[in-house]
Amino acid sequence: MENLPLKPSVVNDFSGIVTMDAVSLMEAIHKRTLSCVEVMQAFLDRIDNCNEQHNALVALEDPDCVLKQAQEKDQQLLRGETCGLMHGFPQAPKDLMPVKGMLTTRGSLVYRANITNNDAVAFARMREAGAVFIGRSNTPELGLGGHTYNRVNGITRNAHDTALSAGGSSGGSAVAVARCMLPVADGSDTMGSLRTPAAFNGVFGLRTTPELIPHGIQDKSVWPVLGVCGPMARTVPDLALLLSVQANFPASLPFSRNAQASTFIKPLQRDFKGVKVAWLGDLANRIPMDPGMLQACESAMPLFQDLGCHLNATVPAFDYEALWESWITLRSFLLYRANASILHDPAQWALTKPEAQWELQRGMHINDTQLKFALHVRDAWRSTLDTTFSDYDFILLPAVQVFPFAVEQNWPKLIAGQHMDTYHRWMQVSIFASMGGVPALSVPVNGHSRTRMAGLQILARPHAELSLLQLGFAYDEARRFSMPPRMG
């Protein structure tokens, strides 16, 4: 492969490239202190050395092919051309939505040979911004469940302990970011699918406001939509970088589309003195938690107080069991509407996991009265959140109810002695943002071992992604400052 002229490299060996934050990597590529070929080779080497242990990335492309694409990106820079913020970034779109010319299995044997002929809008924007697609990130079957395993590509294992779950459904994305196999990664979130794996692997995941990022063909019988796309990253500025591409923010907004790192840092610096924050905890014992989970999240509260936030423990008055029942009604209804062909085709049905079959059968029998009542409860919850946000600027609660569990376990059956009556009841804490149609940022929590990873979710008003990222950035700066120094 032809060697391209470069300015002196900021990194002396490929191993250092993969640990760079994405904003710095973007700058180095555009200043040509790093070539796209160097960057691509570094990440390919990292994937080769690391992915077999974790199985985060699947359906990997031929290395020579992606290196050739990286060389073409370098030639563009030599001509003074740039695709955008992700110029030369290796990416592996989550294996749920289509990518042109690549396998889109959705983690299902039903679609194991499905090569799609178009890009989902979010992926098209990433490609247009210069990303090179090197494969797919693993996901559970049909994206269902908070544990990434399927019979097409196998199990994705936790970034910090391969004996534990990586969470899901964006488990492959979270592990790839946490293990520096990708600089940033996309994900999607209906029931915590960005937030759960972020918490399990110690990274950041942002559930966005519905409709901010196009999320395929949507069933408008439930509107705003429940499922959204969003970014995952190791830092909050990196999260903002990918968000700006996925949401296609114009230059007039804070996430300007240029190659300056300051674009993503300066808007995230903000004073939070006097900002009012509600702490929901476990909703007064309504949400079962693993022993130690609530305490792990509460240990982060002083950091918000140090920022000048006024914290207040509160629980909005609501029938939370009715909210749960309405949630599973809407979820099953939408799953059936999108996948009815599986239920009515015996061959496809035989290839589908029990949890998906349960959802499809429930969805088939939901009538108009049940649907209308579920939508009524959802509207009432959205109104309750509106009232809460009239008193508070942000809402805090745990991102997950359990610590990462054994990788062989399909899903937690018990939490603190309480039986989970569905395969996803253990993720109930995630539905409050989903049903409310509000953005939620999952941030790591300190004070626990690598085998007991936890996260905190920060909720904001609809379309308040910038404020959410600003608080997440301030929190992370305070968190890193408070971390004990590493021993040599």
Image: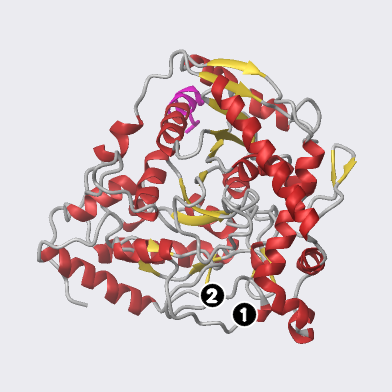
Q: Do the residues labelled 1 and 2 touch (CB within 8 Å)?
A: yes
* Residue in view at x 62 percent, y 28 percent: 447
Could you say whether the residue bearing mark 2 is in a helix, strand or loop? loop
The x, y position of residue 435, in whole percent, is 65, 44
Rate crowding at label 2 as few (under 14), some (14 to 19) or many (20 or more) other CA atoms within 10 Å: many
Q: Tell me the kind of residue under disc 1.
A: Tyr
Whether 103 is drawn above or below 39: the answer is: below
- Reading the image, the residue beneath label 2 is 104
The x, y position of residue 155, in whole percent, is 66, 65
Quarter of the image holding residue 256?
Answer: top left
Along the viewing direction, whichever of 385 and 47 lies nearer the viewer: 385
Along the viewing direction, whichever of 387 and 212 lies nearer the viewer: 387
The x, y position of residue 349, in whole percent, is 77, 79
* Residue in view at x 57 percent, y 65 percent: 138
The x, y position of residue 13, in whole percent, is 30, 55
Query: Is 37 placed left or right of 406 in the picture?
Result: left
**Magenta span includes 433:** no
Query: Which segment did they paint magenta?
Result: 477-488
* Residue in view at x 64 percent, y 63 percent: 143
Could you say whether the residue bearing mark 1 is in a helix, strand or loop? helix
Whether 355 is drawn above or below 152: the answer is: above
Give the Cα distance between marks 1 and 2.
7 Å
- Reading the image, the residue beneath label 1 is 111
Rate crowding at label 1 as few (under 14), some (14 to 19) or many (20 or more) other CA atoms within 10 Å: some
Residue 405 visible? The answer is: no
